[in-house]
Amino acid sequence: PAAAIRDFCERIGVSKAYSVVDFGLLEACVRDNLNVNALRAMAVLRPLKVVIDNYPEGKTEIIEAPLHPDKPELGTSKVTFSREIYVEQDDFMAEPVKKYFRLFPGNEVRLKSAYYITCNSYETDDEGNVTCLHCTYDPESRGGETPDGRKVRGTIHWVSADSAANVEVRLYDRLFNVENPSDDSKELCEYLNPNSLEVLKDSVVDRSFLSGLKIG
């Protein structure tokens, strides 16, 4: 956003001396601007299927998710919830490390704007890769709260398999693999980061995202 670039220019100021500004400062200015102004929507970049075993087969319902966590006046987006959903692969660990609060066998998490779910078991392929989680949900926890007031420490985003649309996502990293590629006499192309672009072809979003968010 133009406002982020103006903010960046104001922060670095003007100097007659040669200087280099860390690219991370520009990224921080962009993040600060988007955090205030950008509408939210859920997408799963590396999908892992979740089956909610005690959710009725064939049932779907509409969940309203806020478009901005700090600006309720902007309304909500309407997304579908069903028995099968997708979560991020990184949101599950069969053997969790310390202070890991997302999905693992026996742990309960909050699905953003939806329900609490507990992971009970998981499936793997012949190579040991996790392919599917089996969970149960608490029907009294819709909206992210429960009558007994219990708390969970993990909240994860999701997309319903019933209304998922495949999209291609491009993740951009630093263009150069050194902090300052003009430091010595090497050619600029020698400093190019070969992993500066990662293309994910199997990411998913709710179909409503493709036709424009439905404001409620």
Image (spheres, helix red, strand yellow):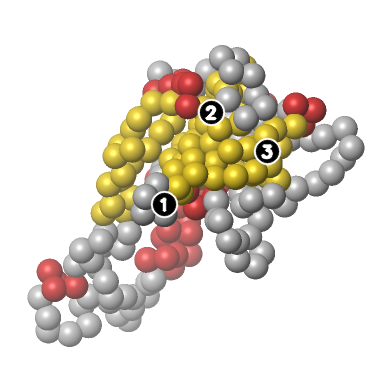
Q: Closer to the camera: disc 2 or disc 1?
A: 1
Residue 55 in the image: state x and y as whole percent.
65, 24
Sooner in the amino-acid sequence: mark 2 or mark 1: 2
Q: Which residue is mark 3?
A: 117
Q: Residue furthest right?
A: 148
Estimate how packed mark 2 is, as few (under 14), some (14 to 19) or many (20 or more) residues with alpha carbons within 10 Å: many
Q: Is residue 91 above or below residue 51?
A: below
Estimate how packed mark 1 is, as few (under 14), some (14 to 19) or many (20 or more) residues with alpha carbons within 10 Å: few
Give the tally of numbered discs. Answer: 3
For the residues labelled 3 and 2, the Cα–Cα distance comes to: 12 Å
For the residues labelled 2 and 1, the Cα–Cα distance comes to: 19 Å
| Residue 209 placement: quadrant | top left
Q: Is residue 213 left or right of residue 69?
A: left
Residue in the foreground of this view, choosing between 6 and 137: 137
Residue 112 in the image: state x and y as whole percent.
64, 37
Residue 5 in the image: state x and y as whole percent.
40, 53
| Residue 155 placement: quadrant | top right
The quadrant in which the N terminus is found is top left
Q: Which residue is mark 2?
A: 84
The amino acid sitting under disc 1 is: Asn
For the residues labelled 3 and 1, the Cα–Cα distance comes to: 22 Å
Residue 7 can be seen in this image = no
**Which residue is pictured at 33% across the width and 50% down the height?**
171
